[in-house]
Amino acid sequence: MEAPARPILVALGSEARSLRLLQAALRLARERSAPWIAVHVETSGTGLPEDREQVEVWLQEAQRLGAELRIVQAPTLAQGLSELTRSTRAQVLLLGRSRDRWPWARVGHSTADELQRRGLDAHLEVMDDRAGVTSSEEPPIRLGAMVGALSVLTAASGLAWLVPREGSLALVLPVFLAAVTFIAHRWGQRLAVLASVLSSLIYNFLLETPRFTRTAAHWPNLLFFLATLLATQAVVGLLQRLRNQAREVHRREVHTASLYLLGRALARGRTLEEVATTAAEHIQRVFKVRACLLFPQGEAWRAVPPPSLDPGLPTPGELLPLLDVGERQGDPLEPLTLGSTYCLSLMGTDRSEGVLQILPGATPGLPPETWELLKAFAVQIALALERLRWLEEARRAQVESETERMRSTLLGAIGHDLRTPLAAIHGAAGSLLLPGHVPETARRDLLTMIQDESERLAHLLGNLLDLTRLESGAIAVQKEWQPLEEVIGAALGRLERRQGSLPIRVDLPESFPLVPLDAALIEQVLVNLIANAQQHAPGQEMELRAWSEPGWIHLEVADQGPGIPAEFQERVFGKFFRLPGSGEGGVGLGLAICRAIVAAHGGRIQVRNRPGGGSSFSFALPLDGTPPPLPEVP
């Protein structure tokens, strides 16, 4: 039977860093599948009421996250933690490092030293307020650093040797202080302390007269030694704080820049695949880990980019409840450890948008400051995915609203035009079915009415189908080089077969170039424009003319009707639009079809009022390419 895992112990105080300690302990416990204990040590004569209240807040938060609580009373913090560590057989003790104004008043550091002197069985980890979790053991002094420090002291001793003996202490002290300060800045505190001791010995044995004698008991020498040591400690503390602040500023700048670049890249994504791929690439580049986004698809996961980093991942129905904050009673962005991977819930405003899966590199786990940035990345990714979902829902709602509006508009626009021919056909057919003899003349009139109304109904439905196919792209424009006079002649012949002779004057230059167009579609445009002119100026003469300019050909159909008010000149090309007071006839689709056909050719269409009265509809088609040579006439 496997023995239970040894617990993780975390020491909490009233400071704000206790929250980060809790998060680090929770993550460490999950990584090692171990229980964890949150402990507060009460020492005699310490603690204000507001501090105790804040401690209660952190302890309640620890309990909510699943920790066992312990409150210990002891003379010192180190003694209480040492006894509890032994009694619980903890494997790790997580401790905060206090950040104090003075270097010698660093409580967390002194507590860690005392715990090590007591022979702590557990592994001690110390978390700085800003730098994150660090090992309590300082790096060893390297040989190169020792050689460098000795070289600096040798140079300082050489300079001090040149100082006159009168008032030597006041002159030598700045020299050695500068040397020790440089060593502290370059190689750290340990060598700085050692250098301060060596500088005092050098001064005593080499510089103070009589030379090569031990005169440390002389009070100026003691003063020199103490001043150098205290100044070294102060300078080292100041340099360390400045270095930490500079490192923190740099880290925040890097984090801000990374978030900015991620947000800008995610904003360019238009599909879920683009956003997920962009997010995974940024995470891999910034954190040097593998990443992918998981989206539930039935009882399986869809990984973007594929494949999933853990093929044995639980199903969505099993994993999503584990990531739910209500189920875990913890931070919704706290990663869930599954094997060698971490899973973060991409929680949106109202639901989870997916799961971010992380596979660390060679070193297992990530430092706390990296997790902070990674959580910020997860928030940005969740917002981007939520934005896509909202855009899709808004687009779907807009399509449904537009469909409903078009349906209502269609029914309102063509309801009368559908009922009229249907009523006529129904009435004529009923008359033919009445018992008794129907005179031949009346019978032919009724059949002619049925035929005419059927053609009118077929024309209406044909226009609807043509417009739908044009707007959906179902009709492909087949451009061919055509003589324009043939297209115009076909349109006029089609109208004359239907209505007889037309009062229209055609003005077409003799040497008109070939035009790249779809003859059948442009013929339909001309038919619709001429029919529209006839409807609004019945019996009046119309004019059809064409001209060319570099890169374009123009066609114009003009009438002598009442014209079109300026406020309606753009709206007449809309679907189901009819001018007020235009009377019956048509449903407002002819000009909409014209605009769709001309736009499919890459052209433009417009209407304007003529100075002498009437309106003029003109459209332009581009002259692209070079026309083929005409065959020679034998």
Image (cartoon, rainbow, N blue to C red):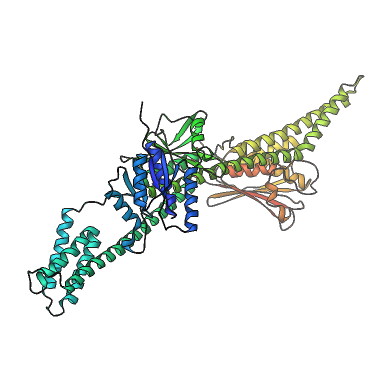
Please say if 352 is above or below 16: above
Q: Where does the N terminus fall, quadrant-wise? A: top left
In percent of width and height, residue 107 lies at: 35, 57
Residue 170 visible here: yes
Q: Can you give x and y, in whole percent of width and height, for residue 86 in the image?
A: 34, 42
- Up-down: is 471 above or below 16? above
Task: Name the residue rendered at 65%, 49% in the picture.
Answer: 618
Q: What residue occupies the far top of the structure in this picture?
A: 436
- Residue 345 spot, x, y in % from top left: 48, 40
Of residues 328 and 315, the one drawn nearer to the viewer in this rendering: 328
Q: Is residue 560 left or right of residue 146?
A: right
Q: Quadrant of residue 497?
A: top right
Classify residue 550 as left or right of residue 86.
right
- Number of labels in the image equals 0
Image point 68% across, 47% down: which residue? 573
**Res 90 quadrant in image:** top left
Q: List x then y, in percent, for residue 172.
A: 17, 73
| Relative depth, front residue between 571 and 44 | 44
User: Residue 503: in sight, yes or no?
Assistant: no
Pick the residue in front: 272 or 238.
238
- Identified at 29% across, 63% down, the residue is 239
Q: Nearer the viewer, residue 9 or 614?
A: 9
Question: Relative to residue 64, is residue 119 drawn left or right?
Answer: left
The residue sitting at the right extreme is 436
